[in-house]
Amino acid sequence: MTKIIDILKIIIGAAGWVWFMIPVVFSGIFNIGNVAGLLFFGVLFLWGLFGKKLREKARERKWAKAALSVLIAGYIAFTSLFIVESGFMTEATLRTPPSDTTVVVLGCAVYGETPSQMLRLRIEAAAEYLKENPEAKAVLSGGQGPNEDIPEALCMYRELVDRGIDGNRLYMEDRSTSTRENIAFSAVIIKENGLSENITIVTNNFHLYRATLSAEAQGFTCYCIPAYTPLPLLATYVMREYMGILAQWTVGD
């Protein structure tokens, strides 16, 4: 039985490691999500490969027994917490909005003046809702990063207008640099302009739960529109979000 488990660890570890390497190789995306995923599945692969030797050593040496116990406990704790967080992430994607909400579109990377793939997917999701609900207004939230020629909010504005959305329905928030600031600065615009405080957050599916935490802390009733995330990139961004949620739960950041 232990041999079968070791083989499964090798297979799962290798498959997971490859999945987390795909964004690095093909998209140049490297962040804490990649690092955590590569570490998690890399160690799992090695555990399966050398599992028999580790178990034999654990019967002879106290340090090896302690190391094996820490390894098992660490993987159980990490996996359990990941499952819990994944449940919250999934629940957030199911908060379907009514027709009378204020849309808050969260920014993402802009390359020069062109939206990144992730931002384009958010723009498309927002455009669909705004076309279906012609009375709805939207706050476009995102500042200008060091490698961006224009603020993310302006990029979203241009793209939505190009998709037929009336610019008078769009409000730009172009100072924020984080999810927390996205919501806090958008809240000011919403209140100053008398917009509905029932808000619909538009961002990629993995990001919605953490955004709702910030929105609810501001006193908003919160709905969600999940933008699609390409499967090859999903693992990396979900793992990065796992870290972000854990930080927000523990230190409020």
Image (cartoon, grey):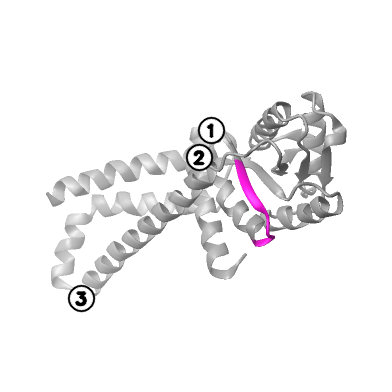
Give the residue drawn at x 34%, y 42%.
14
Which quarter of the figure has residue 164? top right
Residue 215: give x, y in percent of width and height.
Answer: 66, 55
Please say if the residues under marks 2 and 1 sit with CB atoms less than 8 Å apart. yes
- Mark 3 and mark 2: span between their CA atoms? 40 Å
- Mark 1 and mark 3: span between their CA atoms? 46 Å
Residue 67: give x, y in percent of width and height.
Answer: 28, 69
Residue 37: give x, y in percent of width and height.
Answer: 44, 50
Give the residue drawn at x 24%, y 44%.
8
Going by the numbered disc 1, the residue's amino acid type is: Pro
Give the secondary structure at mark 1: loop
Read off the magenta span: 217-224
Going by the numbered disc 2, the residue's amino acid type is: Leu
Numbered badge on residue 230: 1
| Residue 50 located within the stretch drawn in magenta | no
Residue 30: give x, y in percent of width and height.
Answer: 57, 46
Above/below status of 27 relative to 164: below
Residue position for label 3: 62
Which sits earlier in the primary sequence, circle 1 or circle 3? 3
Total number of numbered labels?
3
Which quarter of the figure has residue 27? top right
Give the secondary structure at mark 2: helix
Q: In front: 22, or 119?
A: 119
Give the residue drawn at x 66%, y 44%.
201
Residue position for label 2: 234
Pick out the residue farthest to the bottom. 62
Whether residue 150 is visible to the viewer of this picture, yes or no, is no
